[in-house]
Structures are given as C-alpha cells and as structure tokens.
Amino acid sequence: MGLSRRELLVTGAALATAAAAPRGRGPRLAVAMLSHEGNSFAPVTIGLDAFESSVWAKGDAAQRFDGTATELGGVLDFAAANPDWQVDFLRLAQATPSGPVRADVFDAIVAEVVGDLKARGPYDAVLLILHGALLVEGRDLADLAFVQAVRDAVGTGCALGASFDLHANIDPRLVALLDGGSGYKTHPHVDQADAAKRALAMLRGKVRGELRPVGVLVKAGAILPSINMRTAEGPMAELEAVAAAMLGGTLLDAVPFGGFSYGDSVAAGASAMVFTDGDPALARSAATRLAGEIDARADRFFVALPKPAEAIARAVAAPKPAAIVDAGDNPLSGGVADTPGLLRALIDAKVALPTLFAFFWDPGVVARARAAGVGGRVSGTLGGRLTPDFGAPVPFAATVLRLTDGRFTAQPPFIIGTRLDFGPTALLRLDGTMIDVIVTSLCASPHDPGLLALHGLKIGDHALLAIKAKNHFRAAYAAHLKTIVDTDAPGPAALDIASFPFRRAPRRLRPLNGNPS
C-alpha cells in the first residue's frame, strides 16, 4: 500500500530532517509557485496582501488543493501515483491578476524559494508553477529572472520544469532553461492539473534517464485580444487541434500561447512552445510551424463588440436570464472592478427588469453600509474611485439588503485557489431602479457563483446579470444563462489594444505596428 498524500508532504522540522537524510529514498521533487498575471495599464500595484488573500501557502498547507483541478492538485495526484518520490512544497504564491507586483515583494518571494532550495537540497527535480505574464514594478522579464535564479541555485544536474497559463508572455530564453514544461490548453482554464502533470512527466523521464527533454519557444507576430480566445470554438480551438496533431514519437508537447493582451513587456505577444525528446531541430521546426499557424489566424482574434447601451438593448430583447459582460474591467485580465461605464448605461437605460451588478470594489462604501446595517441607508459614488481615466463616478443612494464576510469555498470547474476572499461585502438596492449591486472590500474574480450564493442569490434570480468578467465565468455560469452579451466599455482590459500606451512591447507586433487586424 502506497503512502498517503499527507505522508508525502514534508513540512517544518520534517523538511530539515528529510534534507539531511541519506539519499536512496527515491527522487526528491521541490515545488514552488509564483503566479500572477500583470496588467501594465491597471491603476494599482500589489503587495503581499494580494497573495495572502488568494494563495499563500507552504508545506502541508498544499494539502487543501487535493482533488482540485489546479496545478497543485495535479502535483498531489503525481505524488500519489509515484509514492517513491519525496515531494517538498516550498513557497506557493498566487494573486488575482492586477497591476504590477511591488519589487520588494517579488524579491522576497524569490529569495525565500532560492534559500529553501539551497538549504533543503539537493533535489532531483524542481517544478515551478508560473503564469508566464508576471510583471514587477520597475522590472522587465520577471518570470525569466525567477527561473534563472532557480536554475542558478539548483545547477544543471537538477531537472527543472514549469507550467504556464495559456495567456503567458514568455521570453524564449526562459524555455531554454527548462528540462520540461507545458501550459493550459483550455480557456476557460479547466486543465490546470493536466498542465502540471505533463511537465512532471517530462521531469520524471529526465530523472529516470528515459527522456532528454529539450524545449523551444518561438514568438508569433501579434498581441491578440483574449475575448475571442476561448477553446470551445474559433481560432484558438483550431490551434489546439493543430498542436494536438503534432504529438507523437519524439515530440512530447506542443502549446500555443495566446499571450496576455495587457502586459507591456519585451516578451509580449502570442507564442508557440514545443518540447521533444532529445531533438532540438524538431522542436525548433515544430514551434516555428505552430507560431506560423497562430499568425495565419491572427485576424480572426480581432472582433467587434457593442458599446454598453447597445449591449443592454440586446440583452433586454433576448431570452432571460441574460448576462451583460463588462470585459474591459474583468479582474482576471487585471481589471479593478472600478470602471463606471456599464452601470451608468444601465441607469440611463431605465431598464424595468430585476438586474444584479457584480461587482464594484469600494471598501469605503462597504464600511458605510456595515455601519448602516441591513435595511439602513447609504449613499456616495460607485466607480471612478481609483482613476478618472475610464469615466466619472456614478452618484447613488441605496438600501442595504445584505452584509457578508466575503469568503467562500471555490467550486469546480474553474478554480484558482480553494477559497475566494472578497473581504467584507454589501448588497445594495439602488434608489429609483431595479438594480442590486454587490460591493466588495477586496478585488477578486466573480467567476465562481459562490459570490452570488454568499448574498442569498443564484443565477436566474435576476433577469439581467451585469458582470465584470470575460471568459472564465462561462465555465460555471453559461449552462444557467440563456443569453450572454459581451460589451466593450472603457477599462484597463478594453478591446482596443492599440489604444493603450505600450512602451516596451516590440512595435513589430500587430496591432502596435498599425495593422489592427
């Protein structure tokens, strides 16, 4: 009978004991996570608290991901299937997409991981769970810097692998440092665990002497908008099919990365990554071919969306329940849940239908609502708190319908962490309207319907749902909605990529080169 997953985890003093134990007890694997998608145009930077409210764990704390469809769930599955391997969970840090990470926080996380690798090693293999579009204040190519620091710490004799998000902006030099890697192949990202398992399979083969994985990444020629990057249909679905058809023989994995549209770095833009077993020429030719397939479809990623007034009219006329998706302020694209355009349009439209707006991030409004209590009155403004760049604040007066602590357990199919934390929240009914608004103290993602359940609601209780989201929410919401209408309102993740003030991204990339599609 194999060891339980809990027995495979090493924590605290036990880590030091394992590090000092004689070799020969099976391969040793270290796992670390530094995952964040940085939006260069969001009006915020983030500190340690952003990680602590999402994923901030170490050692045995990783056990809470057991059975989840996350990379950490995939690692735990690998440990259970390979009981001879000793698995150490080092720092695991992930935050909701937003503006850049403060440099001191990045430096501290990297120093902790590197210090633990040196103190607790040697390791046979290391898996890094990355996003691939990490931005750090005042730095460029933070993912590359992290991977290089880890490679320097463990040396070339240790098998080093990484998993990536489908929206990664990767520098080719990073992949050259790896002995294995993979990325998500679904959007919404419901295959996170599988991405980790694919990378781990390469590391296992490398450690056993059965594989000689070699990877190549080739950049494509465009920064692609993510709104049309879902893998159920369209150009991204075709690219995934092309990549899948490449597999076999010595070609171990092929991953088309759509890239993150709002990360201004020298590694911006879509790309293709291929790993082969000891055949760098095949890796190069296959990655070049896949990048060419991306470029051949680039025009089809660029779509038009209705402005808020038109989107509202379409939703009102369509079967209910209907969602109006404020993609330009999607928190999972670095949105800040603070842009007022869609709410203003809803109020101006005077829609005579029960409507739920999810959500605004405004700790001050929540604090006043809590002071007023359920049934009490609160007033002020919504939106435009962080910056006026995306529209003026919307004045309101409202009745407080419900107050919560903002915390709940995440549910499949799409999971970032095992819990979501919006901080204290309030559900408000705006005077003179049929609009209820969820207001939160922290900015997280509303992709999980648990945010509604927290407030005593479910999908369909309101005829209209206005939601600050883009694609990931569809994994849980789409089956319960009869209509979904995307809208393009001003925000840090709005559709018109060329309108953003890119400074570092290569000007050769569409649409920065003047070719909008």
Image: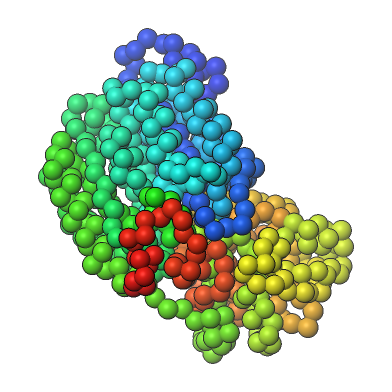
Location of residue 155 by image quarter: top left
**Towards the viewer: 156 or 95:** 156
Location of residue 373 by image quarter: bottom right
Q: State the image coordinates of residue 495 (x, y, percent, origin top left).
A: 47, 70
Q: Residue at x 59, y 35 (%)?
A: 104
Question: Can residue 275 be seen in this snapshot?
Answer: yes
In this view, 180 is above or below 507: above
Q: Residue at x 51, y 36 (%)?
A: 92
Q: Is residue 205 left or right of residue 47?
A: left
In this view, 469 is above or below 307: above
**Towards the viewer: 433 or 493:** 493
Question: Can residue 185 be seen in this snapshot?
Answer: no
Location of residue 142 by image quarter: top left
Q: Residue at x 26, y 26 (%)?
A: 207
Q: State the image coordinates of residue 12 (x, y, percent, origin top left).
A: 55, 21
Q: Is residue 416 left or right of residue 249?
A: right
Q: Is residue 264 left or right of residue 348?
A: left
Furthest residue in direction bottom, as rendered: 317
Q: State the image coordinates of residue 46 (x, y, percent, origin top left).
A: 61, 46
Q: Residue at x 62, y 75 (%)?
A: 341
The N terminus - image quarter: top left
Q: Is residue 72 left or right of residue 464?
A: left
The C terminus - image quarter: bottom left
